[in-house]
Amino acid sequence: MGTTYSKEEILAQQLQTAFEHLITEVVRKDTVFAFATKEQVSSILLYAKEKLGYISFVHLSCVDWLESGEFELVYIIWSPETKINLFVKTRLDRENPSMENTDMIWRQINTYQREIREMFGVEFPGFVGEKEFILEDWEDAPPMRRDFDTLEYVNDTFFEREGREDKQDVRERIAKRSGEEIPDFAKKYSRE
Amino acid sequence: MYNDKNAQTIVDYIQNFTRKNSLFMLAYGTGCGAIELPATLTSRYDAERLGVRGAATPRQADLLLITGYLSTKTLKRVIRVYEQMQDPKYVIGFGSCTINGGMYWDSYNTIKLLDKYIPVDVYINGCMPRPESVISGFQELKRLIAAGKADGAKKYKENLEWYRENQKKVLKNWPLVEYNW
Amino acid sequence: MNSLILLLILMFGGALFAFILNKFVPALRDIFVVLLMLGVSYLFFSTGISNRLNFDVLGIHMQWGFTSASYLFGIIVVVLGSLALIYSTAYMKGKDRLGYFYMNFLFSIGAMLGILMSRDLISLFFFWEIMTWSSYFIVIYSGNDVDRRGLKYMIFSAIGAYSMLMAIVIVNSFIGSFLLEDVFASIFAIGSGYQIAIAILLMIGFGVKSAMMPLHVWAPRAYSESPMSYTAVFSGALSKMGVFGFALVLFNLVSTQNWLINEVVAWLAAITSVLATFYAVIQSDAKKLLAYSSIAQIGYIIIGLASNTYLGVMAGLFLAVLHAVFKSTLFMAVGAVERQVGTTDMTKISGLIRRMPWTFVATLISIIALAGLPPLGGFVGKWMLYEALITSGHYYLVIMVFLSSTAAFLYSYRILFGMFLGQEEPEFAHVKEAPLSMLIPMLILSGISVLSGSHPGFILEPIQSAMASFGFQSNLPHESWWELTVLFNTWGDKVALVNVLTSIVGVFLIALAFITIKGYKNQRYVTTKDISSSGEIIQPEDNMTFQIDFYKPFERAIWPLLKRKIDDYYTDFGKGLEALFDFVRRFYNGNGQFYAIYVMAFLALLLIAGTKYFGF
Amino acid sequence: MNTILIQILGALATILLAFIVGMFYGGAHRKVIARIQNRVGPPIYQNFIDVLKLYSKETSINHGVMQHMGPVFAITASITSLMFVPILTDGNWFSNLNFSGDLVFLVYMMVFGSLGMALGAGQTGNPNSAIGVTRGLSQMVGYEIPFVMAMVALMTQFHTTSITGMIAVQQQSGTWLMFSNPFAFMAAIMAMLGMFSYAPFDIVTAPAEVSSGPISEFGGKYLGMMMTSGSIFAFVKLALFVDIFMGGASNLVVLVIKTFALYMIPVLYGVISPRYRTEQAITYFWKWPLFFGFIAILYAAF
Amino acid sequence: MVISPVQYIAIPLIAAFLIPLFGKLNKELVRIIPGLVLLYLSYISVVLMNQVISQNTMIVEIIAGWRPPWGINLVFSPFSGFLASLFSMLGFIIWMYTYNFKREVEDAQTEKFYVLMMMLITGTIGIVLTGDIFNMFVFLEITAISAYSLTAFYRERDGAEAAFKYLLVGSFASFFILLAIVLLYSQVGTLNMADIAQKMPDVNPYMKGVILMLFFVGFGIEAEMFPLNGWAPDVYTQAPGPIGAIFAGMVVKAGIYGLVRVIFTLFDVHEIFPLLMIMGVITMAVSEVIALRQGKLKRMLAYSSIGQMGLVLVAFGIGTHEAVFAAIFLMFNHAVIKSLLFLSGTYLVYHSKEKNISDLDGIGKSLPFTSFLFALGSLAIVGLPPFAGFWSKLYILMAAADVRLIAVIAIILAVSVVEIVYYFRVLHRIYFRERISTIEIKIPSFNAKISMLILAIVIIVIGVYPDLISGLIERAATDLLDKQHYIQSVLSVGLH
């Protein structure tokens, strides 16, 4: 028909043919998003690694979508042939978040999972790893969740030296300087 | 030995002389301040001419140098290392973070005030202190030693319970086996 | 009755009786064997060397009786045998087939005494074979992997024994007598080719038992997998039978024209000791380590004997005695650890020093003796060996010995560290010191090691008389044994052992007093978990001991030497043979017609060829 | 009685001499390194201060009796070796016991300390100690062989195994043995680089890798005694080399000059060298030094 | 009753025919009668041997009044007497073993078994005792026919096949020997062996060669010489255990007796000795290495037996007095030891269908006594002191060394190593494996134990004190080598 597809579109189509109901989006050059369900993630990763040549694991991160009550896990993988970053995104319920363990696909996922478990409290059932990664003996809520109040915790836990002047929340000032609005939902968690 | 500052015996004098002129330093370099130490120790500033030299393990060391912020996780190690050192021993806090938390004043994971947890003989201010300041800190410590006033270890021994209480406030599940005290 | 016969009857009859006793009254078995062995020891010491017994079997004239040389080895055998049996009573407690074990144990000790009292080659061989199979039965006692390990031992022993037998019958065909005296007297009258062949064949036989390269492949596993109480005797005394045989051959059957044999033997022994030491270094199992170490040490002994100088032979025999002493102590100590802890894998155990202090002391003393450090006995032997080799011009040989004994420091340290030092683990907190009947033999033997370091005279005196029987006249001053404390080499250089001892002990005590008194009040013990580990906090259950790949850097450095083991060549050879045998087997294809054809063909062949070649 | 008194006093004087000289040499070592790195460096007496401070440190913990005895083994070895090395060729004062030992004995005595130390280090349970010890022992196998080859070459060449005999040979012939058998000297000197464990053969105590290796659990008086022992031992090695290769010394000044000159070889070689891994060190010793040793023996024997 | 060598032949032959009759009277008698007969034979052996040795003669028994060289005669010389005594005593021990053996088979079978066994023993004893070459052939046929039947005793396919192979090859043997006898008779005109020996120098050398070759092959088949021994492994494997012992202990020995009697006495040609020795070496080497690769116990024992026979042939082939002494000693030792191995081995694989060595795993715990005796036999057969096998091997080696046959010594010793390997492999399985096989275990009956124990005691006693029988063997060797004495003794009988 004469239509030529870019390599990103080819990838998107490949993924869509392989997985039903998978939403893909070509964001920009060399970047493709795939919005998967929780169950699909591991098979997409495996498929991409084994069949499509996405042999390099770049990153696994977590986003706290407090307002919609969800965590979003983003797996970023990369192929040395096509040079495309494939973002596989999935959303978890914020109540008792849990995700399939995928560290058998790439061993380095282990480290990211440890971090996410500690910082966000996302559980990975069946996952073997050292119990503590960064926070030893942490008893509070996971600190990277947006509803965790850092200042209150600091005041409760640590000693402060008297007479320190520069101790204040600078977010308002930064927002003013750059001319941005602090969104309403964020104000709720503001220190002031 | 330290109780009467004005009356040093000749033995004390010799001891203090050797101690101040031979400081085996254990640099606890977790913070960013560790980058200043190579400069301090090598050709440009040459701390070795003052008798300061690196020690590899706390057993051999006299001086614990804490270079910068301490997270709760590293605090545990620092206490451990400090307790493994043998008397007489001195601590230098290095940089603003050890003094008042510095830029990490509202971090959930770094301590703000080092001398609540272990006794600090000398603080060196700055973020970061340059090698000149570090050497000046060494000189201050030497002055204290010569005067018999660098008695942090003794304070720690005497007020151990107070220190422990503070330490345990941060380190929830007290992890240290009580080997040394 | 002649006490020699009584000795043998007691040993062999006692062995059978122990077996039967075990069936009916197991409780008395231990007491019986120990008493029997003590009685035999008493009998042995009261026998002396002048007793001779002559008799004929099948028209072969035989003679029994100890010479001063064999008496020296006999002392090793009975002393080690008694101590090892005392040790056994505790070590073997609760294992099965004890009747079998003790029977073969006593058999092999009896056979060793038999070998030593043989003054003719046939009874020597007779007892040699008894020793072989009785030790073989103990080697396979543990029952694991007998097909490979046991067979290897048996095959090599058989090869050795049969080469001996071949030499024996050839000697007899020339001389017409099996008596050692006759053989020694007239060996040089026969053709020099046969002379050399006889010496070599005999040395193959003795070389197998003393585990000399390339006949050593049976030894590591045979030593390491026998019960340790027997390995003490196995490595300490039984391998010395090979040394005894070497002494007989080298001093009596090799003429001075054939000095090359001496050199070749010495070099083979040197290579043995170097390679075995290297293998010992890379072992991680204490028993195997000691097994390789034994091979290496016997290498030194044979080098000493083969050097054929007064000092060298004295060094060889001294080391033979001392090796029996310290190596059996070490095997006993390892056995004690095995019994108390359950394993000898040094990657698993660590930090037993406070649990088993006396075992540690015995091990430490024996290791110092093994490593040849002054002021213990090992140094005396090593010193004599080096000086003998240097003064007799074996320059490169002495380097080999030095290489081997320097590398021996590595495994010496390994075994002390692996078992006793390192971190003390909670899983070994329950471990108790070995029972007294195991400790006493070890400590007695350690005492001998210590005493021999400064006053070696009490060992050198019997060695002197043994050497006189080999034709080396004593040049030591005739002093009481406690006065013999200065060793000389032929260039007149000396080492004064008492000065050494005084200096070491004096400085050691002063320094120890100083370091102990200084700050005595503040002195305190901290556990091995309290170590500086870059701040990491070691929990009691963490084991930080460095045990795996202990000498990896060294292993890398010597890797080219270790790439291929001699064992592999033998295995390949064996496989090739079996394939060949399978081929031969096809001859019997099970078909009757073929068999009939064979018969006809054979007859035809005979009829055709017979007239031609058999000349009717 | 008088001779015994002189012997004891002489022994004490020897120890003191060895200690002082060794300490100053240690200071000089640090100073030389500093100057080469364009630093001022510590004063030359810095090592005395360090040792005194270590002895004056108060708390002393140990992990058991072997650790307690480790430094004692070390100092026993150094002092006993010292006793058997002739310090001066003339006079009674520094002769000690050197008439009753020989080179083979000395070679073994020198190992004694390392093994004793290794036992002490082993008991601390520190993995770094054990790693350091294994490296040290492996390296020892490396350098002992060329050293012994050199010694054997000299022994065979001059038909004596004692040091006094070697000195006598040199005094008779008037030539130093380093010229009589230069190959042996080469081998021995290269082995000496390893014996001193300075760079490039300092992987045993590499502070950044194994946190000072065997001594990582030793502090206070233990470390002090080890430094003492190390200084004495350095002196012993130097005196031994001077005796064997450089004709001995007739008085203390000559002794100091000769030993210092010799000492500068490992120091200067170390300053400009990076660090070898253990197997590299072993192969280093088993290449050229071994070759020289081989040649030396051939040269001596024929 | 006057004791005479004739009784060796007559009594068991009569007993063999009477056994079925006694079987009608009492079933137990069938089992008892052979024992009594063999006991009596053992008794007369002792008496006759004593007589022969002490008077330094040989007993020549004339049958039917015809004096040699015309009639058939029996010669009880030290050599043949020794073998006859050995056969009768061994026969008695084996009978003791068989007394309760296979009680489950039907009575008719038992009768047949004993009839055949008696005939077999009669035949073997006849071979060694007879002084007439044709008579020897007759006894050989008696032996062979009963052996064929016994091989197929179990009436199984494999047994029948083995028997058929034996029959096939055995008939060649009979044919060759008969042919040789015919040719010989045509040359010398007599069948008496002493007479033949006397007249042998007159025979045409070419005919002599042919006849000797025919004898060589014929007796070689019976003596299991390579490559004529194809029948042997199957027969040993398929025959009942005690019969295997009889084969190894007697039948083969009788074959060897025939061979050496023909070679040493009749022909006395020394040119054949190297051939004998070479064939012995090949037999030994080939069969021992094949034994190494066997997976079945009895087959292994069979090959081992062949190997030992090879060794005997080597010793005879050396031909010196010492060698012959060693050979006879080895024949004795082998008869005893191999019988012990067959007897004990039979119980070890009693219920096993395949008789695989792997079925022996861990049997040492279940059958301690039998296993122990098997182990003892193994140690003895490979020639380890202090057991009997050692001395005979030693003597063979000494004899070989005396004539500088170094290569032969080396081969014998190398083969001994192979022997050690396969016997010890079996011992390992017996003692050091876990028992996994579910095959039922048969405990030996008391009499079987006693019989095996007797053999074991003989082995140990001879091993420790070989002089016990060395005198007899010495005389036997002298007898075999002293041809003139044999001729004179036989031919002078009845002359006075």
Image (spheres, helix red, strand yellow):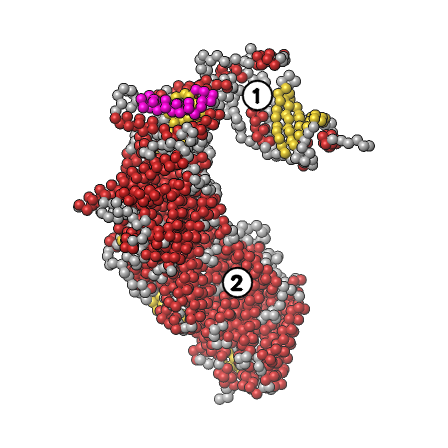
The residue carrying mark 1 is A144
- Residue E494, percent across and down? 51, 86
Q: Is residue E32 left or right of C512 when viewed as pictured?
A: right
* x, y percent for residue E410: 50, 67
Looking at the rendered structure, the secondary structure element under dot 1 is: loop
User: Eyeballing the image, is C337 above or below C303?
Assistant: above
From the viewer's perspective, is residue E91 above or below residue A95?
Answer: below
Question: Which chain hosts label 1?
Answer: A
- What amino acid does circle 1 point to? Met
Label 1: how many Cα within 10 Å (few below 14, some 14–19, many 20+): some
Q: Which element type, helix, strand or loop, lies under badge 2?
A: helix
Region in magenta: B125-150
What residue would you read off at disc 2?
Answer: E419
- Residue at the spot 61% in from the left edge and 70% down from the top edge: E227
Q: Which residue corresponds to the image point at 33% horizontal and 64% vertical from the top-left?
A: C470
Q: Disc 2 residue type? A: Glu
Magenta-span inclusion, residue A151: no
Residue D220 at x, y = what percent? 34, 32
